Image (tube, rainbow, N blue to C red):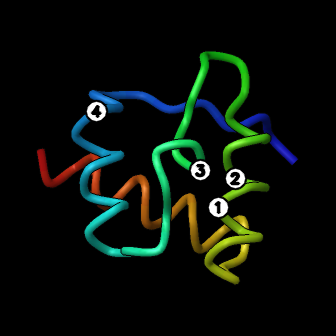
Amino acid sequence: MDKFEIKGNWEEIRARLQQKYPGLTKNDLTYTVGQGEELLRRLGEKTGQSRSALIKDITTLRSKG
């Protein structure tokens, strides 16, 4: 399993994730460089989505910018 890192404007991606998953809080979407796996774990717990589904969502949302 590769280590996940966010590339692109995290503020825009975070806003889009909150639109897609309205139940996510600002704390759920806290991201620090090097903590991508922790972010995916939190998001998975809150949304019920798999790691791969979340990575796909983030990648798709990033490319819409």
Instruction: Determine the secondary structure under disc 2.
Output: helix
Instruction: Determine the secondary structure under disc 3.
Output: loop
Taking 40 as reference, is 30 above or below it? above
Say the numbered circle drawn on residue 52. Answer: none
Residue kind at label 1, given as amino acid type: Leu
The CA span between labels 2 and 3 is 10 Å
Residue kind at label 4, given as amino acid type: Glu
Number of the front mark, 1 or 3: 3
Number of the front mark, 3 or 4: 3
The CA span between labels 1 and 3 is 7 Å
| Residue that carries the numbered disc 2 in the rendered image | 40
Binning the other alpha carbons within 10 Å of mark 2 as few (below 14), some (14 to 19) or many (20 upward) gives: many
Question: Outermost residue, bottom direction?
Answer: 48
Residue at left offset 66%, top offset 68%: 52
Taking 63 as reference, is 3 above or below it? above
Looking at the image, is mark 3 or mark 4 earlier in the sequence? 4
Instruction: Determine the secondary structure under disc 1.
Output: helix
Residue at left offset 56%, top offset 58%: 55
| Residue that carries the numbered disc 3 in the rendered image | 28
Question: Is residue 65 left or right of 23 when viewed as pictured?
Answer: left
| Residue that carries the numbered disc 4 in the rendered image | 11
Marks 1/2 in contact by CB < 8 Å: the verdict is: yes
Residue at left offset 60%, top offset 20%: 32
Marks 1/3 in contact by CB < 8 Å: the verdict is: yes
Taking 61 as reference, is 11 above or below it? above
Looking at the image, is mark 4 or mark 2 earlier in the sequence? 4
